[in-house]
Every structure is written in structure tokens, then in C-alpha cells.
Image (cartoon, rainbow, N blue to C red):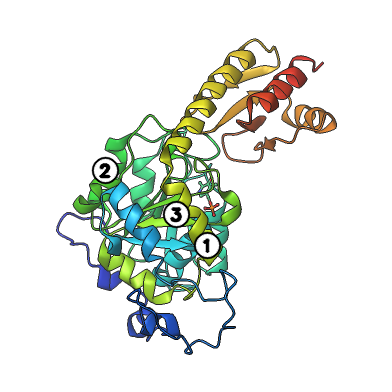
Amino acid sequence: MYNKTMKFDLNRLVRENVKTLRPYSSARDEYISDGSEKIFLDANENPFNNGINRYPDPQQRSLKAVLATQKELNEDQILLGNGSDEVLDLIFRAFCEPKIDNVITMPPTYGMYGVLAAINNSVNREVLLVDGFVLDEKALFENIDGNTKIIFICSPNNPTGHSFPKEQIRNILDKFKGLVVIDEAYIDFSIQKGWLSELSDHKNLIITQTFSKAYGMAGIRLGCCYASSDIIAILNKIKPPYNVNELTQQRALQAVSNTASVAREVKMILAERGRLEMALKAMSFVRKIYPSDANFILIEVDDANKRYQQLLKKGIIVRNRSNQHLCRNTLRFTIGTPEENDSLINALTNLV
Ligand SMILES: *Cc1c(COP(=O)(O)O)cnc(C)c1O
């Protein structure tokens, strides 16, 4: 799967049933409004206008038009979903033949890749990160076989907060002839530039982003997938027709038209992260503060279960990541508002 003579062949990666599938054609797919006054009696909707009585645009064209401009892509390189979780699930369903194909993930990382592999009955080959959360390229390539369809790289990574070196990722993109999904859920917090500008150089690259983190819209459930138009066309074939609802499309459209406010909030969150880091440095039960390229901090403490329970008693809920590989006695703190961070610092300072 990664020898130099082999070429990337998308057709070989797609599941047979997806290749031959005739997608559902919805009423709103068949007739696309040109903006002129029409009478819509095609979709069995309630005719009385309340703003949401019509089915939403299955292709979210207004939203994609803005995103395409901002991300410097074509609209046919974008697929939107009900959170990135749906997008990731669609990728599994398009490419991983149940019981036959496998994917590679690199724990400690986002737990949904493994869950989605299980749901889709595909083997999740875990190539563990090594000390310092370093990606083990040798082990990675040893684990690839003819049925390895996807490698998931989360960068910046959750729960560690670190980003992988670009050269390492580029090497994987160049050598692996399956798909590489780079999950950029936290890219807006990162000092690294993301991979969007390199999409045209790598036919096997899929980038996912989300409105749940920097955009502050976890409640609307909107995830983005950026890839070649060929990959997007395959995912489009299998997506539920109305997977992004009208209210979500409207709110997202407002948000993408106001990027200044997102940038302002990201700046504040990063400043707060620095402040929390400084405060943590002075605490005796904190063993290690992992450098973060995201909107959370992973720390190692003396006794994570004890500290977790103590914070819980004070009404502060953090994430105990101690069960994860290389994460013994770690807690993950999301950066909150300045007031929330004050409360956290205050609570931590008074722990005995
Ligand atoms: C939070 C997060 C997401 C976002 O998922 P949504 O379904 O879009 O809310 C995706 N990937 C990672 C690694 C995350 O931590």
C-alpha cells in the first residue's frame, strides 16, 4: 500500500455497493429554485410560511459559497454534515468494507474514530504514539496492508493538545496510497497553518473541521469536510439528503459572515490559556503541563482521580484522561471564560 510504484486510485478504495448505488433524489434536488416566484407543490410540505416549513437546501449552497471563498476552494470540494462526527461516519461508510477493511488511528487521540470503526465493523489498528506523543512512523507503515483504507491524524490532537510535525504528515500523505483524514477541529487555535492550501497536491487528503470549537456553535451541529471533488462526490452520494437543517444553515451563514468575532474570541481564549498555564506552574501537585496548540490544556498531576473528585465537589467538571495511553494521572481542562478560569484557578489553588 505504500510502495513508490503504486499510484493512488480512488476507484479501488470505494466500496463496491457505493460505486453502484443510485442515490435518493429528493424533491429539492430535482428542482433548484432560480429565485423567481414559483409554487412549490412537490415535497408534501405544509404550505404556510413560518420560516422553516420548507425542506432545507440539501447542498447548502449559500453556506458553501461563502466557505469556498474563505477557504479558497471550489464548492464541489466541500461537504457539510451534522457535526464532524457525521462526516467521519460517512467516510467510513463510503470506503470501509465491513469485516474486511481496516483503518489506523494513533492513540491517545479522539475516541470517535475507534467508535465509528466499531459501528462500521472495521478493524481499528491502533499505532500508539511513543513517549512525548511522537508519531511512530515505522510502526505506522508496518501496520499498513492491502485493506488499510484510512489513516486518521488529529492535529492539533485531542486530548494531548499538540500538533504533529508537518514533514511527518507530508511523508505519510506521499507514501500511503489510501486516504489520510486530518482532523482540524482545533486548527483555529493553532500556531500552525492547516492543510487546506495543500489539498490540490494530495489526492488522498481529506480535511475535517467543525463549527463546534472556535466558532462557538457546538449546539447547531455542523461539521465540514474538504477534499478533492472526486472524494466529495462519493460522500455526497451517500449522505442523508437533508443532513444539515435549515436553522443550522442560517446560523452558520451569519457566523461565517462575522469572522472578526470568532478571531476576537480565539484571541481571548489563547490569552486565557496562557494565564491558566502560568497559574498551574505554581501548583505543587501539578507534575507536568503539556504545551497546547488548542483551546484546552492537558496536565499531569499527583493523583488525577483525587483531584478530579475534589474539583467535582466544588462544582467544576473537567476531563479525566488517565485511562488513555501515555496519559496516566492526566486531567484535561477546557479554557472557559475569564470568570470560569478564575474559579478553576481558585479551586485548584485551595486543594490540599
Ligand atoms: C470536538 C472535536 C470534533 C468536533 O466534532 P463535532 O461533531 O463537529 O462537534 C472533531 N474532532 C475532534 C478531535 C474533536 O475534539
Q: Which residue is mark 2?
A: 170
Q: What x and y, as percent, mark residue 341?
A: 66, 24
Residue labelled 1 has its Cβ within 8 Å of some atom of ligand 1: yes
Q: What x and y, as percent, mark residue 42?
A: 47, 89
Q: Which mark is residue 82?
A: 1
Q: In terms of sequence position, does the residue under pointer 2 or pointer 1 come before the other?
A: 1
State which quarter of the image contains the C terminus: top right
As drawn, which residue projects farthest toward the right?
313
Q: What x and y, as percent, mark residue 259?
A: 42, 40
Horizontally, residue 331 falls left or right of residue 73, namely right
Residue depth check, mark 3 versus mark 2: number of the one nearer the observer:
3
Residue labelled 2 has its Cβ within 8 Å of some atom of ligand 1: no
Report the amino acid beneath label 2. Arg
Q: Which mark is residue 163?
A: none
Q: Is residue 117 above or below residue 156?
A: below
Residue depth check, mark 2 versus mark 1: number of the one nearer the observer:
1
Residue shown at 33% from the left, 80% from the top = 19
Closer to the camera in the image, 171 or 252: 252
C-alpha distance separating marks 2 and 1: 29 Å
Residue shown at 77% from the left, 21% from the top = 347
Q: What x and y, as percent, mark residue 269?
A: 54, 28
Crowd band around label 1 with a 10 angstrom C-alpha radius: few (<14), some (14–19), many (20+): some
Q: In terms of sequence position, does the residue under pointer 3 or pointer 1 come before the other?
A: 1
Q: Is residue 272 above or below residue 246?
A: above
Q: Which residue is mark 3?
A: 253
State which quarter of the image contains the N terminus: bottom left
Report the amino acid beneath label 1. Asn
C-alpha distance separating marks 3 and 1: 15 Å
